[in-house]
Amino acid sequence: MKVLFIGCGDIGVRCIHRLQMLEGWTGLAMRRHPDRLPATIPSVTGDICDTPHLTELLRTAGIDAIVVTLTPGEMSDEGYRASYVAGAESLAKAIRDSGWCSGPVLWVSSTGVYGQGGGEWVDELSDTVPASYRGKRLLQAEGLIGRLPVPAVVIRYAGVYGPGRGRMLAQIHKGELAPPKPVQWSNRIHAEDCAGVLVHFLQRYRDDRPLHSLYLATDNEPAPLYDVHRWLAEQLDINMTDTVTTASAGRAGNRRCSNQRLLESGYRFLYPTFREGYAALISESPE
């Protein structure tokens, strides 16, 4: 089974490396600068918004499934529109024009599409009323993917952490600590589990096992950000005081994300909570 990874960054690379260890799978990365990929990753130059090129690729390259992991060119409304919305429009047109009728398309989105701010639990059936331009554009793109003429699955990731994503550890090293009250709920998923979820869905589809059209991908334990920071400080042997706080007032949303549907699909986490994931990061970090 040949899988095209569009916008193949860190998560896509992790997926392809996993597929390379499985019999019968091939991963092909498509991005604007494939020279930045590891030499072990088969790749082609391309942009999701280059509809003619994408159409030709789908028509001739023997693609069986598509995984889309985009990054906006800039952190602005226009940046998100030009990547996610325009990308979804281009992909839809390329699928129609090429006559590609395989599947599935796995489209990576974000829990940022939720607007809840009072610590509520959210799942795949919860209302999506995003307050930010990011959430609004992501939700707009999701709508386009939901209307594709081939099977499609949208995956809303919570906050991704892992190697090369050490913002929270850097905050702790600087002595920054979230306030204990009001509670700021934190939802996260390790980058390796991000890749694991995508490979899990590809395997379920190949095995003709049912998939929902939407999943939340977050680990097993939403936790108050204060508790996460305090635990990290203990692991790093850093003395923290409750008077030093992060500039966290601008964090978008405040909710607890449920991964029940994902667990029911049979996925089992490599890093079930922040403790296992950050413990691995700390052990791998140079002194």
Image (tube, helix red, strand yellow):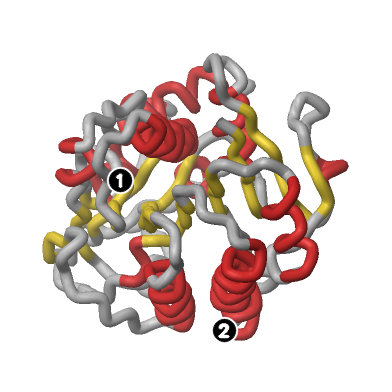
The numbered dot on residue 218 is 1
Q: Is residue 164 visible?
A: no
Q: Residues within 10 Å of mark 2 (few under 14, many from 20)?
A: some
Q: Residue at x 12, y 65 (%)?
A: 120
Give residue 152's position: percent from left, percent from top: 40, 56
Q: Which of marks 1 and 2 precedes in the sequence?
A: 2
Q: Which residue is mark 2?
A: 77
Classify residue 209 by image quadrant. top left
Classify residue 165 by image quadrant. top right
Classify residue 117 by image quadrant. bottom left
Q: Residue at x 28, y 71 (%)?
A: 114
Q: Is residue 233 above or below residue 22?
A: below
Q: Residues within 10 Å of mark 1 (few under 14, many from 20)?
A: many
Q: Secondary structure at mark 2?
A: helix
Q: Is residue 118 left or right of residue 2?
A: left
Measured Cα–Cα span from mark 2 to mark 1: 25 Å
Q: Nearer the viewer, residue 62 or 213?
A: 62
Give residue 69's position: percent from left, percent from top: 56, 53
Q: Residue furthest front?
A: 99
Q: Is residue 80 left or right of residue 157?
A: right
Quadrant the N terminus occupies: top right
Q: Amino acid at mark 1?
A: Thr
Q: Is residue 93 above or below residue 186?
A: below
Q: Is residue 99 above or below residue 232?
A: below
Q: Is residue 68 above or below residue 80?
A: above
Q: Residue at x 77, y 24 (%)?
A: 40
Q: Residue at x 28, y 40 (%)?
A: 219
Q: Nearer the viewer, residue 57 or 175?
A: 57
Q: Amino acid at mark 2?
A: Asp
Q: Secondary structure at mark 1?
A: loop
The numbered dot on residue 38 is none
